[in-house]
Image (spheres, rainbow, N blue to C red):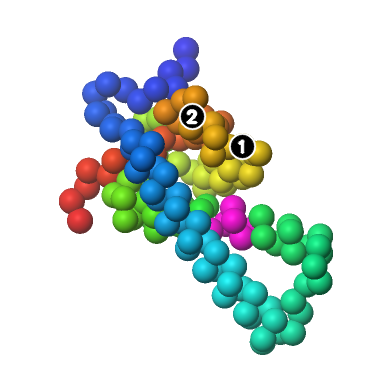
Amino acid sequence: MHNNQPNESQKLILAEKGTRFGHNIIDTIGFYFIVFLHAMVLDEWLGIIPEEGSDWFVFYFFFLYVMYHALFEHFFGKTPGKFLTKTKVVKNDGNKPSFMNILGRNTARLIPFDPLSFLFSDRGWHDQISNTYVIVDKKKE
């Protein structure tokens, strides 16, 4: 039988909703900074800023959004916001998720109303779908 909850012996402490909201705000600011830098490169250096309503730019925007979170979580186990709030992403057994697991987690962020899923659960849809947890990082830095 599959148990989707962390084992009691692992003492994983789920990050509180307020903490998660905080790192979401920080990561949103970080993501838009990346978008700003990409827009500068596309416009100033390459001269290929898309026209308003361009389909490829919408796809590019979503790609950047997923990759911003996925690359940070894959290489560091946390995004800049999670660094500042001292939290990290783990699997239900407390181990580091695989890249495909993280990619699925962050693609699921694109589900409409995913941020509102925290109103009804301790874990958002992107956590539940990918079977990941955002926990307090107890490691001494």
| 97 relative position to 140: left or right | right
Q: Residue furthest bottom?
A: 45
Residue receiving disc 2:
119
Residue 80 in percent (x, y) is at 39, 58
Name the dominant secondary structure of the magenta segment: helix
Element on which disc 1 rests:
loop
Residue 43 in percent (x, y) is at 70, 81
In the rendered structure, which amino acid carries the disc numbered 2?
A: Leu
Residue 5 in percent (x, y) is at 39, 22
Callout 2: 10 Å neighbours few (<14), some, many (20+)? few
- Using the image as rendered, state which of residue 47 and residue 102 is in the foreground: 47
Is residue 46 something that shows in the picture? yes
Residue receiving disc 1:
113
Q: Quadrant of the C terminus?
A: bottom left
Is residue 79 something that shows in the picture? no
**Does residue 45 sit above or below 74 in this rendering?**
below
Q: Residue at x 49, y 25 (%)?
A: 120
Kindly check if marks 1 and 2 are in contact, taking CB atoms under 8 A apart as contact. Answer: no
Callout 1: 10 Å neighbours few (<14), some, many (20+)? few
**Magenta residue span:** 63-68
Q: Residue at x 36, y 40 (%)?
A: 18
Using the rendered view, name the quadrant where residue 67 is placed: bottom right
**Does residue 90 sit above or below 3 in this rendering?**
below
| 15 relative position to 41: left or right | left
**Does residue 110 sit above or below 37 in this rendering?**
above
Distance, label 1 to label 2, CA atoms, is 11 Å
